[in-house]
Amino acid sequence: MAKRAGMEVAMAVAEAVGQCNIDMAAVYPITPQSHIAEHLSELIADGKVDAEFVTVESEHSAMSAVIGASGTGARVYTATSSQGLMLMHELLPIASAMRLPIVMGIANRAVSGPLNILNDHSDIMPQRDSGWISIFVENGQEAIDLSIQAFKIAEHKDVLLPVCINIDGFQLTHMVEPVEFPEQELVDKFLPPREPYATLHPGKPVTMGAFAMSDYYPEMMKAKNEAIKNSKKTILAVWEEWAKIFGRAYKPVETYKAEGAEILLLTMGSMGETAEVAIDELRAQGKSVGLVKLRLWRPFPFEELKEAVKEAKKLIVIDRAVSFGGPGGPVFSEIKSALYHEEARPMICNYIIGLGGRDVAVTDFTGMITRVLREDSKKIADTCEFWGVRER
C-alpha cells in the first residue's frame, strides 16, 4: 500500500528521489534547499538508497559532477537554490546541449542583492533560456509526484533533456504537509532503468560536448529548440500514465472556477492555493472570477493557455520576479507574447508581489481583483504595479 506521512516537503522530495533508483547525487547545501541534500545523503549513508553521494565544494562543482556521471549513463540528481543556481548557470546550457537527462530540484529563493534567503522566483527566471524543461509545483504531494515523473520525462528517448522542478523555498520546502508516497513496486514499473543513448567509457571512447564553429552551431541550437518544444508530447503522455496508475492528474495549465469567469487571476507555484481561497470569497460575493495556474514553464503551453483564458475579459498576471527595465514581470511578458495574435484576448495587467519572501495573503489577491473590477480596462491594460510596496 502507499505510504502516508506527515513530513517536511524538502525531506519528502529526498525520499521521492530515493524511490527512483538513482545511481548518483551531487548536491551542495544552500538555504532553503539544504534539507533535500542532508536527507538524501542520510538515506544513501544508511544504505536505504543504493547510490553514490558525491561531496563537492560548490554548486558549480555539483552540476559538473552530475554532467559527468550522466554522461556515463548514470541516473543522477542534484538540487540548489538562488545564488547556487546562479553559480551553476555557466553549465546549464551545456547539460541541455549534451542532451543529458539530469533532474534538479530548485528551492526557489530570492537572488542577492541585498542578501535574502526567502522565497520568490528571481532565481529560476534568468535560467529560462538554458534549454531545461521547467515545472512548478504547488504543494508537497505535487513535489513528490513531479520529482519522480521528471526522471521518466528526462530519460525518454524522444526527450533526453534535463528537467528542473521548482519548489517555493520555505513557504513550501519547510512546510510539514500530509503526503502519500507511491508504492515502490509501482514506481519501479512506472520508471524502468535508464537506457542511455551513448555513454562515456574508457573502453570505448566517444566524444561528447565537442567544439563547434559557426558551420554547425546554429543547427545545434535549432535542434535543441525543437527538442524542448517536442518534449511536450512526452510530458503529456507521462502525466497521463501517472494519472492512470496513481490517480493524480497533472496538466500544463490548470484552472479553478475559471469557466465562464470574466476576470481571471494567473499564478505559478505555491501561492495558487492561497489564491483559491480568494476566488472562493469573491465568488461568494457574486463576483465572476476564476484562477489559472501555470505549471509548465518550459516548454511553454501556448494552446492550453489560450484555451483557459479565451472567455475572460480581464487577466491579472502575478509575478514573483522583476524583469528590470522591461514591460513588467517575466511571466507577464510571456503571457502577453503568447496572446498577442489572439483577436479576442483579454485585457492583461500585471502585479509583482511576494518579493524576498514578503507574505502574500488572501486579502492581497482579493484586493488586486477588486481594483481590476472597478478600473476601466483602457486605464489598466498592459500596466505593471509592485503590489503592497510602501511609499516613502
Image (cartoon, rainbow, N blue to C red):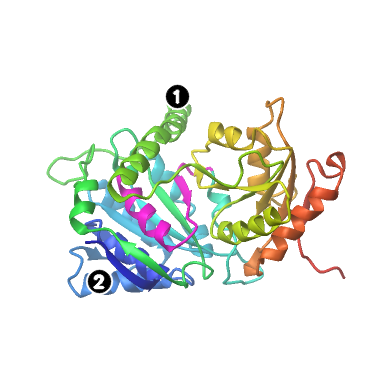
Quick one: SS at disc 2? helix
Answer few, some or many: residues within 10 Å of disc 2's Cα (few below 14, many 20 plus, some between 14 and 19): some
- Residue identifier under label 1: 215
Amino acid type assigned to the residue bearing label 1 in the image = Asp
Residue 127: percent from left, percent from top:
53, 49
Q: Nearer the viewer, residue 381 or 74?
A: 381
Tell me how far mark 2 sits from mark 1, CA to CA: 47 Å
Q: Quadrant of residue 50?
A: bottom left
Report if residue 191 is visible in the image. Answer: no
Looking at the rendered structure, the kind of residue marked 2 is: Leu
In the displayed structure, 102 sits above or below 119; it is above
Q: Residue 192: horizontal and vertical position, in percent? A: 20, 46
What residue is shown at x 21% (from left), y 42% (from top)? 199
Residue lying at the far left in this picture: please name it.
203
Residue 145 seen: yes
The x, y position of residue 220, in whole percent, is 42, 30
Q: Residue at x 33, y 71 (%)?
A: 5
- Residue 43, numbered label: 2
How many labels, in total?
A: 2
State which quarter of the image contains the N terminus.
bottom left
When asked about the image quadrant of residue 258, the answer is top right
**Residue 131 among those drawn in magenta:** yes
